Amino acid sequence: MTTTLADSPFLQAARGGTPSHTPVWFMRQAGRSLPEYRAVREGVAMLDSCFRPELVVEITMQPVRRHGVDAAIFFSDIVVPLKAIGVDLDIVPGTGPVVAEPIRSADQLAQLRDIEPDDVEPIAESVRGLVDELGSTPLIGFAGAPFTLASYLIEGGPSRDHRRTKQLMYAEPELWHALAGRLAAIAGQFLRVQVENGASAVQLFDSWAGALSLADYRRFVLPHSQAALSALDGLDVPRIHFGVGTGELLGAMGEAGVDVVGVDWRVPLDEAVKRIGPGKAVQGNLDPTTLFAPTEVVEREAARVIEAGRTAPGHVFNLGHGVLPDTDPDALTRLVDFVHGYDAR
Ligand code: 1CP
């Protein structure tokens, strides 16, 4: 029997079904840990690579070929849509996104204009090329959620405590809502371009939402994440929502209009299922540092994750956050084989 895209294990699980094996992919599976990634990126700046379709296709395919994962994650970055509309920013090696002029006032919001088709033509072309090449393996499109994007724009770069972001939120709530509203529109447009060109699912990354209390999350963030995801209304693709340190927010994140809630490694999946409530699939949540332990430990912990995931209607195996750069790629391949073989034992 040939598998079609629609009955791929990843899409079945994301829709709350029980496929023949637990599907697995890894956040940050493309890039970083792979020598073939470092080879093709040689001499090409990160953001330049994101606008070169032949490179995007190749880098996205590398982990699919090497590990046999059940889904591809589009090679891009959460700041790519901002770059596409002309925001002056760069991804600095060893640091991450750095914004030339942090956005902290109402008159700076004008630069956060809507995405026009021309801005993202290389993205659309990359997605189309990938869908051709991937066949029955689904492509996951993604965007950064308003809070995480706002943090980079307001702080000017990575931040440990998101102090200026919260300061703006508390001191100038109207400006905050205007900024987050613009970012929701842009994130929604970026997700829509990927789906309209053939992505089979999306993930909205709110990596740093765990910095917020539940009350602040509900008041300042959830409505904007909901707005970003509502851009996909009418397009029949599963939506995944993920953040780090979001144990207290899991229920609220599930209310953003999502099918799957991504869980970091801090909360066991069976406990996460109780917090999220009925009807949603889960994704996660092996601690990425486990991959530095002996294979028996990785397999014991992976089995624990799979068993806890059985309490959800649909489980997509993943790490609790991204693959760490110096992870042994062979450990990832072994983990994929273990997860795929687990249900057959
Ligand atoms: O030169 C390089 O190789 C730079 C490293 C790199 C890569 C490979 C960055 C810089 N971004 C990416 C690609 C990327 N970013 C993907 C593609 C798929 C994949 O790698 O498998 C994705 C999905 C992202 C998303 C992303 N970027 C997030 C959300 C997910 C997460 O991991 O939490 C965030 C927060 C970013 C910002 C970012 N971009 C790059 C770095 C080092 C960072 C984090 C910096 C920080 O700590 O604030």
Image (tube, helix red, strand yellow):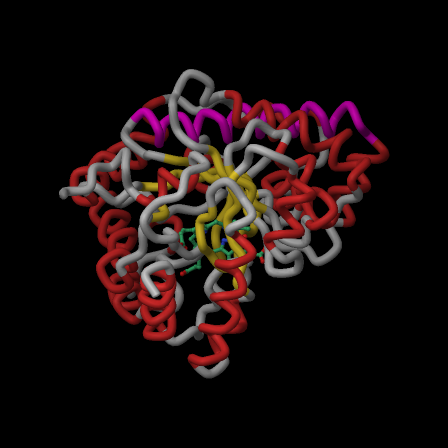
Q: Is residue 345 above or below residue 292?
A: above
> In the rendered image, is residue 108 in sight?
no
* Above or below, 163 relative to 149: below
Residue 68 position, x and y percent, is 26, 59
Name which residue lies at 50% across and 80% down: 293
The answer to whether residue 3 is magenta is: no
Q: Quadrant of the C terminus?
A: bottom left
Which of the 4 image quarters holds residue 117?
Answer: top left
Front residue of 303 and 34: 303
- Residue farthest to the top? 234
The outermost residue toward the left is 1
Q: Quadrant of residue 167?
A: top right
- Image coords of residue 107 (percent x, y): 67, 25
Image quarter hosting the N terminus: top left
The x, y position of residue 230, in whole percent, is 52, 21
* Residue appearing at x 45%, y 54% in the figure: 317
Is 185 left or right of 21, judged from the image as shown? right
In-image side of 180 versus 175 (left or right): left
Left or right: where 273 falls relative to 68: right
Image quarter for residue 148? top right
**What secondary structure is the stretch in magenta mostly built from?**
helix
Nearer to the camera, 26 or 186: 26
Kindly give the residue lying farthest to the front in the view shown.
345
Closest to the observer, 37 or 317: 317
Q: Is residue 194 left or right of residue 289?
A: left
Judge by depth and name the residue closer to the eye, 144 or 317: 317
Q: Which residues are magenta?
A: 172-196
Q: Residue at the spot x=72%, y=31% of the render?
A: 105
Residue depicted at x 74% and y 42%: 165
* Outermost residue to the right: 171
Residue 48, given in percent of the width and then of the height, sits at 34, 49
In the image, residue 188 above or below residue 344 = above
